[in-house]
């Protein structure tokens, strides 16, 4: 396997790195990956991920369940239940933050298309970008919603979209700087960019250390907190307007982290610790396991 070598920091461009954590791919390969921290700006990133062209063996495809089906296994059931509950919350975030009840939306990294479908049903004109053929096919068969492969995004016209969304996608992208430039061009002057990412300053990240499931190496390349993501977006013409917690991710992530630690009764322990994280995040939203960020274009 040939590895990508991120020598310089994607945020500030500085050379030189400090070890941050030694993580394991608990889900697929059991390989070790070292997280590095930029000594200049504090950005944390996976230092030696596989090259972008070699990622398929590491990727976890989305759960493909027809509406009304129930997945097998407690963790998958919980994940699926939370994901369906979150669709309405995501729709609310889009409409309340854009001050629109319809318009044009680009959903980047659309996976199996549940969110795209939800927004289409609410009257939005949705364009979806998804790199996996299997996911695009599922969306077409399940929702009759045609998604586009990543290179097709270059054919979209500038200033086309009122809203661009990335739900737990940006941390997977190999060229975050190039992507933010593209989003800036594609958004209308009053448009907004919404990104949800895991939060390395969360209560659960601090508690679980290298076992924290949302490090998810080598699939997650960039490990953001509010400061690093807002500074990166600022470099590309965006201003952070709003942020809020994703309230339920702490349960799913805590259960998975307990499993990584091979604790007995991982499910129960994860639920209990997830509840603790959820309580803390009520008072301190920046300690939430995952955060949603809303950016506007600077004029
Ligand atoms: Zn840096």
Image (cartoon, rainbow, N blue to C red):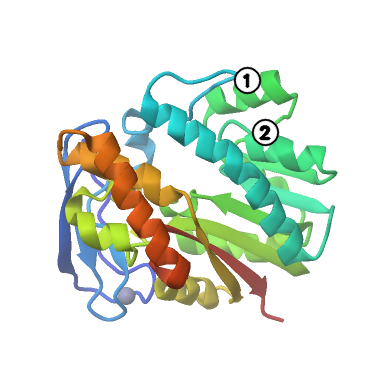
Say which quadrant the N terminus sits in.
Answer: top left
Residue 9 sits above or below residue 261 on the image = below
- Residue 288 seen: no
Q: Is residue 126 left or right of residue 28?
A: right
Viewer-proximal residue among 202 and 8: 202
Query: How far from the left and from the top, in percent, is residue 90?
Result: 64, 51
**Residue at label 1?**
68
Look at 45% across and 28% down and name the residue there: 77
Q: Residues within 10 Å of mark 1 (few under 14, many from 20)?
A: few
Residue 235 sits above or below residue 61 on the image = below
Look at 15% across and 41% down and name the residue there: 261
Viewer-proximal residue among 280 and 137: 280
Q: How many marks?
A: 2
Look at 18% across and 53% down and name the residue there: 210
Query: How far from the left and from the top, in percent, is residue 100?
Result: 83, 60
Query: How far from the left and from the top, in percent, is residue 72?
Result: 42, 18
Look at 19% across and 73% down and name the residue there: 16
Query: How far from the left and from the top, in percent, is residue 56?
Result: 37, 31
**Residue at label 2?**
147
> Picture quarter containing residue 206?
bottom left
> Picture quarter containing residue 294?
bottom right
């Amino acid at each position: 396997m040939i590895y990508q070598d991120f020598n310089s920091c994607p945020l500030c461009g500085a050379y030189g790195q400090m070890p941050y954590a030694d993580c394991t791919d608990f889900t697929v390969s059991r390989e070790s990956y070292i997280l590095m921290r930029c000594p200049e700006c504090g950005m944390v990133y996976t230092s030696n991920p596989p090259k972008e062209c070699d990622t398929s063996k590491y990727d976890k495809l989305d759960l493909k369940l027809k509406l009304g089906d129930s997945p097998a296994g407690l963790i998958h059931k919980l994940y699926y239940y939370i994901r369906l509950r979150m669709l309405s919350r995501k729709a609310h975030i889009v409409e309340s933050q854009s001050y629109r009840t319809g318009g044009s939306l680009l959903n980047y990294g659309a996976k199996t298309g549940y969110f795209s479908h939800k927004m289409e049903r609410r009257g939005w004109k949705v364009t979806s970008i998804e790199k996996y053929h299997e996911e695009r096919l599922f969306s077409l068969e399940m929702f009759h919603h045609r998604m586009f492969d990543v290179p097709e995004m270059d054919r979209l016209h500038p200033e086309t979209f009122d809203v661009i969304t990335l739900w737990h996608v940006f941390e997977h992208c190999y060229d975050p700087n190039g992507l933010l430039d593209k989003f800036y061009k594609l958004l209308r002057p009053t448009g907004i960019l919404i990104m949800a990412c895991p939060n390395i300053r969360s209560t659960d990240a601090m508690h679980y250390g290298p076992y924290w499931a949302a490090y998810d190496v080598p699939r997650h390349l960039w490990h953001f907190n509010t400061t690093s993501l807002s500074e990166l977006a600022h470099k590309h013409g965006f201003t952070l307007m709003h942020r809020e917690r994703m309230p339920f991710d702490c349960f799913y992530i805590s259960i998975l982290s307990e499993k990584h630690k091979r604790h007995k009764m991982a499910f129960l322990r994860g639920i209990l610790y997830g509840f603790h994280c959820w309580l803390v995040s009520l008072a301190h939203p920046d300690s939430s396991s995952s955060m949603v960020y809303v950016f506007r274009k600077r004029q």
